[in-house]
Amino acid sequence: MGSVGQSVLEGIIDAIGYPVVFADMGHIIRYMNMPAMKYYGEEKGWGNLTGKSLLDCHNPESVKKIKQTVDRFASGGGEEFEQINKKGQRVYITPVRDSSGNLIGYFERREFVSPA
């Protein structure tokens, strides 16, 4: 498979219908897809969070859970279901590894679930 350009990869991630926020191992937000920019920036009024700590966007209990989850990722763990929040959104945290398998960060995604 040939090299895929960054704009193609960003286009693919932007096409995902739910917010995706990627943070590095220092918990700094490095990328937000377009649905995340709309959800956090426009709907919540927080603006572009790129360059800010993901941990600053969460309450102390969530910060604890995120750190524990990232520790499990460092031990080889995979995607984890975090919670169904008050809005009925399913929240997941997924590890991101480089081509050598080293953990380089994680992303949080929210699935907006319609009531049955």
Image (cartoon, rainbow, N blue to C red):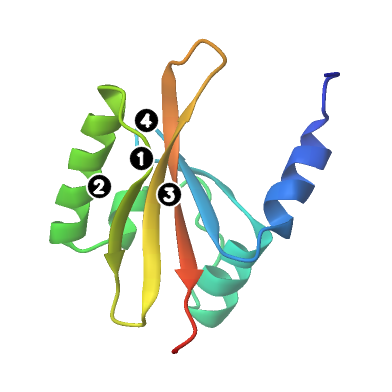
What is the C-alpha distance between the residues marked 2 and 4? 11 Å
Tell which circle, 2 or 4, labels the residue nearer the N-terminal end: 4
Choose mark 1 or mark 3, whichever is in front: 1
Tell which circle, 4 or 3, labels the residue nearer the N-terminal end: 4
Q: Tag 2: residue type?
A: Ile
What is the C-alpha distance between the residues marked 1 and 4? 5 Å
Marks 2 and 1 close (CB-CB < 8 Å): yes
Residue 82, image x, y percentages: 28, 57
Task: Name the one closer to the observer, 26 or 1.
Answer: 1
Residue identifier under label 3: 52
Residue identifier under label 2: 66
Name the residue at 28% across, 81% down. Answer: 86
Name the residue at 43% across, 16% down. Answer: 102
Q: Tag 3: residue type?
A: Lys
Q: Quadrant of the N terminus?
A: top right
User: Crowding at label 4, few (<14), some or many (≥20) Cα neighbours within 10 Å?
Assistant: some
Residue identifier under label 1: 27
Tell which circle, 2 or 1, labels the residue nearer the N-terminal end: 1
Q: Tag 1: residue type?
A: His
Residue identifier under label 4: 25
Give the side of residue 102 with respect to residue 65, left or right.
right
Q: Secondary structure at mark 3?
A: loop
Q: Secondary structure at mark 1?
A: loop
Marks 4 and 3 close (CB-CB < 8 Å): no
Outermost residue to the top? 100
Task: Name the one closer to the observer, 31 or 73.
Answer: 73
Name the residue at 50% across, 77% down. Answer: 45
